[in-house]
Image (spheres, helix red, strand yellow):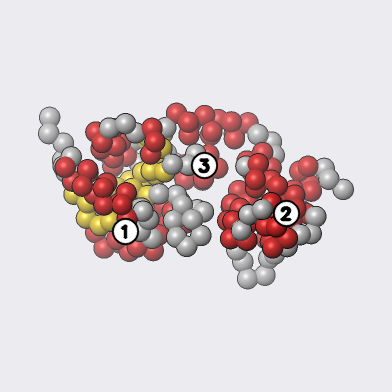
């Protein structure tokens, strides 16, 4: 049975990988109607072309933390008929849970390094486009583990916890960077990830840094 040609929007900030995926998908019968490198480009392309499925990386400009997944969440709200396949090299169970919280139909999350053949990716696209769900086993494991954790602190990576611990001690980003021997930009990225995992969106009045520290002190029982 011949499958219909899928109309695909591809969001990947790496130019080399993006162009390579366009060639591979096109060779497999998919019609890549747009290939973009930013979350805003993704939203605009989906609005313009109305694809069957969008392939989205998690970490995209400008901060390379969670912009891709935020755009995917927006698409789930505004264009629920469009399938979403997260295609990333990172295992982010917390972000996967957020994407799946509105329902698993038409959602996929695959790890780049574990897709051995283009046919596997195309098969996943077809399943997602028709309302199916495709999850890498590592993502499933992460979801199960995160679901049994009682503390949001457990969702943090080792480095994120180090950054938060130093925040709680009153250190600035510059001081944290010096102590951990990293750049201030790296500290900012870790802080953004902490805010995301603690579900602390930016607002005009709230200080997310203070709230993150309060959460840390409360859940670790620190004085």
Q: Quadrant of residue 219?
A: top right
Q: Which mark is residue 92?
A: 3
The reply to whether the C-beta atoms of the residues labelled 2 and 1 are less than 8 Å apart is no
Vertical arrangement, residue 132 with respect to residue 172, above or below: above
Q: Residues within 10 Å of mark 1 (few under 14, many from 20)?
A: many
- Tell me which label, 3 or 1, sits earlier in the chain: 1
- 51 vs 138, nearest the viewer: 138
Residue 40: percent from left, percent from top: 39, 63
Q: Are marks 3 and 2 in contact (CB under 8 Å)?
A: no
- From this view, report whether residue 146 is shown above or below residue 71: above
SS of the residue under disc 3: loop
Q: Is residue 213 left or right of residue 47?
A: right
Residue at 38 percent of width and 43 percent of height: 87
Q: Give the quadrant of the N terminus.
A: top left
Q: Please tell me which residue is depicted at 65% across the width and 34% down the height of the picture.
A: 149
The residue singled out by tag 1 in the image is 36
- Of residue 27 and residue 95, the one placed in the foreground of this image is 27
Residue on which disc 2 sits: 179
Name the secondary structure under disc 2: helix
| Residue 178 seen from this side | yes
Secondary structure state at the residue bearing disc 1: strand
Q: Residue furthest right?
A: 223
Callout 2: few (<14), some (14-19), or many (20+) C-alpha neighbours within 10 Å? few
């Amino acid at each position: 049975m011949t499958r219909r040609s899928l109309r695909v929007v591809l969001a990947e900030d790496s130019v080399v990988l993006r162009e390579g995926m366009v060639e591979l998908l096109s060779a497999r019968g998919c019609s890549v109607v747009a290939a973009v490198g930013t979350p805003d480009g993704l939203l605009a392309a989906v609005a313009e072309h109305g694809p069957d499925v969008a392939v989205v990386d998690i970490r995209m400009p400008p901060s390379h933390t969670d912009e891709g997944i935020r755009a995917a969440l927006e698409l789930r709200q505004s264009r629920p008929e469009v399938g979403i396949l997260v295609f990333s090299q990172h295992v982010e169970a917390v972000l996967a849970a957020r994407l799946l919280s509105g329902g698993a139909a038409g959602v996929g999350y695959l790890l780049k390094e574990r897709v051995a053949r283009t046919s596997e990716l195309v098969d996943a696209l077809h399943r997602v486009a028709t309302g199916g769900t495709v999850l890498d086993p590592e993502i499933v494991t992460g979801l199960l583990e995160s679901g049994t954790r009682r503390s949001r602190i457990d969702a943090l990576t080792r480095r994120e916890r180090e950054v938060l611990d130093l925040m709680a001690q009153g250190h600035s980003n510059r001081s944290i960077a010096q102590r951990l021997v990293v750049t201030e930009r790296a500290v900012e990225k870790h802080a953004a990830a902490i805010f995301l995992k603690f579900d602390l969106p930016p607002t005009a009045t709230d200080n997310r840094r203070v709230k993150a520290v309060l959460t840390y002190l409360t859940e670790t029982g620190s004085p």
